[in-house]
């Protein structure tokens, strides 16, 4: 390619967005900032959605059912080729951590905004991921860095060595499926058989591993970003402990009340392990944090829903940087230039019944988004938007920034009060209640806090 050609507008690279909703819009915005052409694939359910008009072009990839559109690898590849894409951004969910998809993108001569198929496959196997982290001196939950044998006596011996309670996990699992807690030796053999069957059924991989079960941990994660030239950065930490059934409700950065020296040591090790394994792209190291210690559990190889809290405290555009490193560009900053400042809190707004948590699809008849200093709203929703029953019920993210946690909290509270959504039920009022909970206001709640809070609320309403 000649210089004159590379500067002509027709030669701009094209990004195909293989996702929908708020993250599709977030990716479109990053592409605009970078001066890239950006095109979308949409399902029949999303035809005519307002965010699609923000892209340079868009094409239908199939019916509403995700399996036939956003999860349909041949349909996505064909659409990207038709719209002359150079890169494919998978967002989160759908095909974002599918190694077969990553391979198909490579085979079709395009570039995935994400790590290689090989790395994705390796991190998708939780036992391989754990072994890689142990090798890189990232602290892990006590337990073997290998799959369990089939011999009941050998398994019992491993459990005795770890000490009860233990947890059995499917190597092909993650995100909360295919796990079983075992509190006594008498229950181990049956639990092993059941977990084995589930692992085979859900993930097509019968491999099981065992860890010490941590009773009351927090969920703290480290954001990383790595280029193809050997630079790997960590961009701080997030606390995602406020969750219900593995669906996060509130995330914040930084994790409150944790020794900054310890976080720095963990973050540095995460970044170094990325450089060691040749990781390119954005990624997240998930840890459990209990009694002053970090324990690695899984790595996510995608951009995450909660990335905005990290963007707010670092001032970086993680999605733009993620696209740039996928294009082979070197990261434009060093670790010393990554500075975090202040505090950010994100509330996930879902279209759901606040009592039953059942999805509440329908037409948004009215939408007023909050704003003002330190308030960011990531959403594709406007008055008139149809919320489909075919997809996740998350429709908006309210992110509040402050010089400290108290200011972020008070801005988040005011933003939630201001927000109005009519036509679908939402969890806005639930968030308002959570943000005045004394436990949450103090900071540092465990992953079980929300369910306990709900139980207490039910009891006081009875
Ligand atoms: C654990 C654990 C306690 N001890 N591992 C759930 C999702 C998957 N990513 C790992 N998970 C857990 N692994 C050990 N050794 C508790 C959980 C867990 C959890 C973790 C993070 C966020 C929410 C959670 C909710 C329930 C259980």
Image: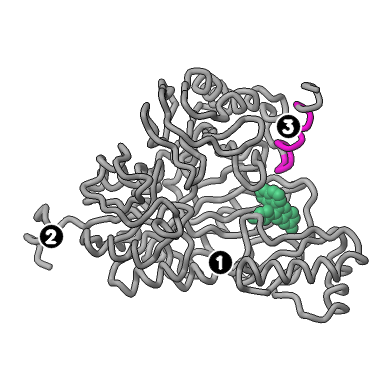
Instruction: Measure the C-alpha gap from mark 3 to mark 1.
Output: 33 Å
* Residue 346 appears in the picture as rendered: no
Q: Quadrant of the C terminus?
A: top right
**For residue 385, above or below residue 24:** above
Give the residue at the far left of this rendering.
Answer: 4
Residue name at image x 21 percent, y 47 percent: 56
- Is residue 164 shown left or right of residue 134? right
For residue 113, side relative to residue 142 (left or right): left
> Could you tell me if residue 314 is visible in this image?
yes
Q: Is residue 145 above or below residue 237?
A: below
Scheme by which the image is coloured: one colour
Determine which residue is flagged by label 1: 124
Quadrant of the image occupied by residue 107: bottom left
10 Å neighbourhood of mark 2: few (<14), some, or many (≥20)?
Answer: few
Q: Position of residue 248 (x, y in %)?
A: 60, 42
Q: Looking at the picture, does residue 310 appear above or below residue 140?
A: above
Residue 378 is situated, as x and y percent measured from the top left of the image, at 42, 35
Q: Which residue is mark 2?
A: 6
Height in image: 451 above or below 94? above
Which residue is pictured at 33% across the width and 59% down the height? 88
Question: Badge 3 is on which residue?
Answer: 454
> Mark 2 against mark 3, which lies toward the viewer?
3
> Is label 3 in a helix, a strand or a loop?
helix
Extreme residue toward the right, this view: 186
Magenta-span inclusion, residue 272 = no
Please give left or right for residue 55 compared with residue 76 in the image: left
Over which residues does the magenta segment extend? 446-457
Q: CA distance from mark 1 to mark 2?
A: 37 Å
Q: Classify residue 128 by image quadrant.
A: bottom right
């Amino acid at each position: 390619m000649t210089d004159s050609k590379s500067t002509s507008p027709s030669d701009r690279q094209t990004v195909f967005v293989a996702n929908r909703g708020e993250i599709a819009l977030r990716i479109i915005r990053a592409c605009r900032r970078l001066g890239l052409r950006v095109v979308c694939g949409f399902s029949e359910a999303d035809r005519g959605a307002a965010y699609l008009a923000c892209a340079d072009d868009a094409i239908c990839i199939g019916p509403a059912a995700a399996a036939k559109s956003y999860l349909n690898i041949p349909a996505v590849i064909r659409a990207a080729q038709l719209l002359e894409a150079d890169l494919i951004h998978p967002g989160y969910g759908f095909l974002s951590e599918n190694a077969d998809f990553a391979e198909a993108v490579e085979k079709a001569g395009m570039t995935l905004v994400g790590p290689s198929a090989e790395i994705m496959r390796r991190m998708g196997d939780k036992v391989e991921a754990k072994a890689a982290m142990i090798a890189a001196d990232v602290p892990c939950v006590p337990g073997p860095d290998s799959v369990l044998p089939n011999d009941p006596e050998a398994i019992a011996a491993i459990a005795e060595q770890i000490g009860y309670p233990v947890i059995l996990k499917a190597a092909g699992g993650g995100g909360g499926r295919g796990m079983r807690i075992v509190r006594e030796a008498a229950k181990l053999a049956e639990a092993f058989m059941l977990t084995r069957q589930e692992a085979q059924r859900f993930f097509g991989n019968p491999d099981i591993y065992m860890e010490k079960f941590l009773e009351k941990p927090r969920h703290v994660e480290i954001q990383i970003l790595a280029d193809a030239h050997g630079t790997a950065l960590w961009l701080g930490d997030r606390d995602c402990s406020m969750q219900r059934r593995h669906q996060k409700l509130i995330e914040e950065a930084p994790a409150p009340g944790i020794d900054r020296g310890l976080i720095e040591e963990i973050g540095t090790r995460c970044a170094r392990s990325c450089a060691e394994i040749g990781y390119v792209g954005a990624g997240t190291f998930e840890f459990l944090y209990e009694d002053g210690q970090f324990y690695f559990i899984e790595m996510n190889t995608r951009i995450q829903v909660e990335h905005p809290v990290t963007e707010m405290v670092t001032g970086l555009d993680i999605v733009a940087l993620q696209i740039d490193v996928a294009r082979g560009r070197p990261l434009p900053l060093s670790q010393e230039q990554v500075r975090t400042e202040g505090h950010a809190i994100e509330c996930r707004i879902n279209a759901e019944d606040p009592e039953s948590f059942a999805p509440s699809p329908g037409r948004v008849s009215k939408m007023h988004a909050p704003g003002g200093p330190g308030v960011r709203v990531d959403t594709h929703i406007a008055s008139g938007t149809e919320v489909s029953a075919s997809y996740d019920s998350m429709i908006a993210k309210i992110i509040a920034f402050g010089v400290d946690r108290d200011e972020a909290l008070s801005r988040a509270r005011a933003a939630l009060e201001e927000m109005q959504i009519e036509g679908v039920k939402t969890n806005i009022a639930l968030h308002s209640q959570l943000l005045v909970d004394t436990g949450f206001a103090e900071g540092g709640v465990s992953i079980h806090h929300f369910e306990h809070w709900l139980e207490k609320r039910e009891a006081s309403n009875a």
